[in-house]
């Protein structure tokens, strides 16, 4: 079992829909990162959070430390949101400080 | 230009050859990282560096060598390339206090093919 699991692996939606991507982790963490990988391959950090909720534009990230679960929401989705979204758990894992990445969720927003 | 750059962007090499991938950042970030990204595995940490002359192994270090003589540069060398090292390599940097508390900034990636 992967230490960080994302669901769904693939998601296709229509423009304007509300999108939710989930991330569950099995390790104790200090911070949870959400990244966006564009179709061209570039990776951008969207959020880093250790508790509660953060919002940036149409993107909202939440985390529940007790349940070891985080969600990334996109409101009023747009075709330019099409990308791979990656969550990564950061903490002391197997005795070392590191980030463990999920395998990503491929999001496609159709016009 | 400000930011984090990688070179080359694309590289094809033969099995057994030595290859060096370059990474340069202009922010004076303390931490730098090398990842590889493969289908079915996501991003995996190869090596990281907390400061100049300080490096440490990540999850998949075998077959790779790093050095960091200057804060801004973090080259990754494949001493004797193998086909299993065909991958996309990303360099990243982060402000001090490391990966846990600060966001990482990624380079554009290097697509390496070993034939």
Image: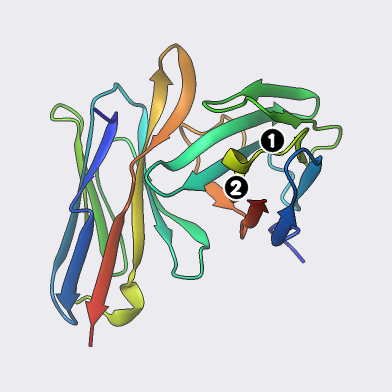
Instruction: Please provide percent x and percent y for residue B14.
Output: 75, 48
Q: What residue is disc 1 on?
A: B30
CA distance for labels 1 and 2: 28 Å
Q: What residue is disc 2 on?
A: B86
Along the polypeptide, which appears first: circle 1 or circle 2?
A: 1
Instruction: Please provide percent x and percent y for residue A109.
Output: 24, 77
- A23 to the left or right of B34: left
Q: Is residue A98 above or below residue B29?
A: above
Say which quarter of the image contains residue A110: bottom left
The residue sitting at 61% across, 60% down in the picture is B108
Element on which disc 1 rests:
loop
The residue sitting at 72% across, 39% down in the picture is B81
- Evaluate whether residue B6 shows in this view: no
Choose between B20 and A53: the one closer to the eye: B20
Q: Is residue A74 above or below residue B57?
A: below
The residue sitting at 69% across, 62% down in the picture is B10
């Amino acid at each position: 079992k992967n230490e960080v699991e994302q669901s769904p692996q693939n998601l296709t939606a229509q423009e304007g829909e509300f999108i939710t991507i989930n991330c569950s982790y099995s390790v104790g963490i200090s911070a949870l990162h959400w990244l966006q990988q564009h179709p061209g391959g570039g990776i951008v950090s969207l959020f880093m959070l250790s508790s509660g909720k953060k919002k940036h534009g149409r993107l909202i990230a939440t985390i529940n430390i007790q349940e070891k679960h985080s969600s990334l929401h996109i409101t009023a989705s747009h075709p330019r949101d099409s990308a791979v979204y990656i969550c990564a758990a950061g903490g002391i894992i197997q005795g070392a400080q590191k980030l463990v990445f999920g395998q990503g969720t491929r999001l496609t927003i159709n016009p | 230009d400000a930011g984090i750059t990688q070179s080359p962007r694309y590289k094809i090499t033969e099995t057994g050859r030595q290859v060096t991938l370059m990474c340069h950042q202009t922010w004076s970030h303390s931490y730098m990282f090398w990842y590889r990204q493969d289908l079915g595995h996501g991003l995996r940490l190869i090596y990281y560096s907390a400061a100049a002359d300080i490096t440490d192994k990540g999850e998949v270090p075998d077959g790779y060598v790093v050095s960091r003589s200057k804060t801004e540069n973090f080259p990754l060398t494949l001493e004797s390339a193998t086909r299993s090292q065909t991958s996309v390599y990303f360099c990243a940097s982060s402000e001090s206090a490391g990966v846990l508390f600060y966001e990482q900034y990624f380079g554009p990636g290097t697509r390496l093919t070993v034939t």
